[in-house]
Image (cartoon, rainbow, N blue to C red):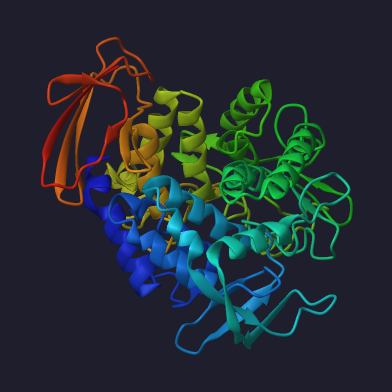
Amino acid sequence: MNIMLNGWTVYQTIESRLLGRSGYYQSGGAYGFRDQLQDTLGLKYIHPEFLKHQILKHAKHQFVEGDVEHWWHEETGRGIRTRFSDDLLWLVYVTLEYINHTGDTSILEIEIPYLQGELLKEGEDEKYDKYQVTSFKEPLYEHCKKAIERSLNFGENGLPKIGSGDWNDGFSTVGNKGKGESVWLGFFLYGILDKFIPICKQKGEEELAQKYTTIQNQLKRALNTNGWDGRWYKRAFMDDGNILGSMENDECRIDSIAQSWSIISQAGDNDKKYISMDSLENHLVDRENGIIKLLDPPFAKGKLEPGYIKAYLPGVRENGGQYTHAAIWVIIAEALLGFGDKALEFYRMINPIEHSRTKEASNKYKVEPYVIPADIYGAGNLAGRGGWTWYTGSSSWFYKAGIEYILGLKIEDGYLRIDPCIPKDWKEYSMQYKWENSVYTIKVSNPNNKNTGVTKVLLNGIEVENKIKLDNSNGIYHIEIMM
């Protein structure tokens, strides 16, 4: 954990994801709308300007209608317009994360142009073109509103329509005819509305805040009724009426991200959150191979036709392997529930170093033990073999999960607090955090074998509340935390 968090993970994120936009197994060079935004989430601790720069860059690739380019090349100015349903919402998500971390709401006032161009025709899922920049600009706040408004497109189950894919690009024919709905996207949208409503109120838009609150309440009801399958949350409703993530299925009976985001978004009913995470552990955590699968069983020869995900061999990449991005969301969910032993067990499990402790393990894993892999194969004789390394958005999430959710370093609106979720047998740990010109040495003691909960905070020997104002005046501060 020390080795990964003290250098390699941040190096991988900056070098491969932000600068090179390339890796050994994928060499594209493009900017992915959702991808490079998420890459900056973990970097907020290093330099929040990473987030700000990326937000403003990506906002320029939003169309007047609110949708966005799925990816584009800076060199040519050409990009692809699609029917992906989650891309546009990541602009709002990362903007909210930046504001929460820094307290800098002035970013919402920065004026940015849009793209304009021909709309997708009926039956057309994507179009690659050079789109024109508008002559007018609008504040980032308006860009965020447009993204949300565009996403308020609900189907007959009261859930957002999935389009030609949500976070899972491989679900390319789940809803491209205009009827399919995404349970995961419902959770994601709920979580965004939850944090955006207070900003609407700050802006004096009470009517809009009320509208979003009503939608949020309806969404929560739909997610916990139509989206619930008895022991876990469904994943999606398809155009043809079939359901992904249902216990009645032979393939894709359960999918990870609907379960983890029921907790991350805080939209899941209390009892359902615990039941669904138990089911996730029973069906998707493979301790023998040290992986957390995205879904199970994989798509093979069954009746379901969800899209190009089915072109992958069973157990490879999204099709039933570990998709590390989603595995980290499982860890974050466990930490939010207060399960520190489980959170660290799973965090260790997906740490690449743990896949190369012996010659036998290394021969199975086959890829670099010092970078996060995008995926690990999950079935047959390939189980436990690493897939893409370097070029994966999961490196930033891995850093964020370790620093923020396990070690519990939270920076909010210019204040520092420590809110750990650790194994009961951890007696103590320490961190050193440099913020601008000041250094904070943090020691956490856990004499009572707790997973969570802070009882005392000392700042330079004086007891204070667990909310310390960050100071950039070249200070050295010693923080002692008692759990």
Residue sitting at x 52%, y 74%: 112
Count of marks placed on residues: 0
Position of the C terminus, as image quadrant, is top left
The percent position of residue 151, horizontal first and vertical second, equals 72, 57
- Above or below: residue 127 compared with residue 225: below
Position of the N terminus, as image quadrant, is top left
- Above or below: residue 92 compared with residue 405: below
The percent position of residue 177, horizontal first and vertical second, equals 85, 65
* Left/right of residue 46 with respect to residue 34 in the rendered view: left
- Above or below: residue 83 compared with residue 324: below
Residue sitting at x 68%, y 26%: 269
Does residue 385 show up? no
Work out which residue is located at the far front of the displayed protein and give it: 204
Q: Nearer the viewer, residue 364 or 328?
A: 328
Quarter of the image where one finds residue 442 = top left
Does residue 126 show up? yes
Q: Nearer the viewer, residue 445 or 112?
A: 112
Q: Nearer the viewer, residue 360 or 210?
A: 210
The percent position of residue 17, horizontal first and vertical second, equals 39, 66
The percent position of residue 239, horizontal first and vertical second, equals 86, 57
Residue sitting at x 44%, y 60%: 392
* Left/right of residue 12 with respect to residue 277 in the rendered view: left
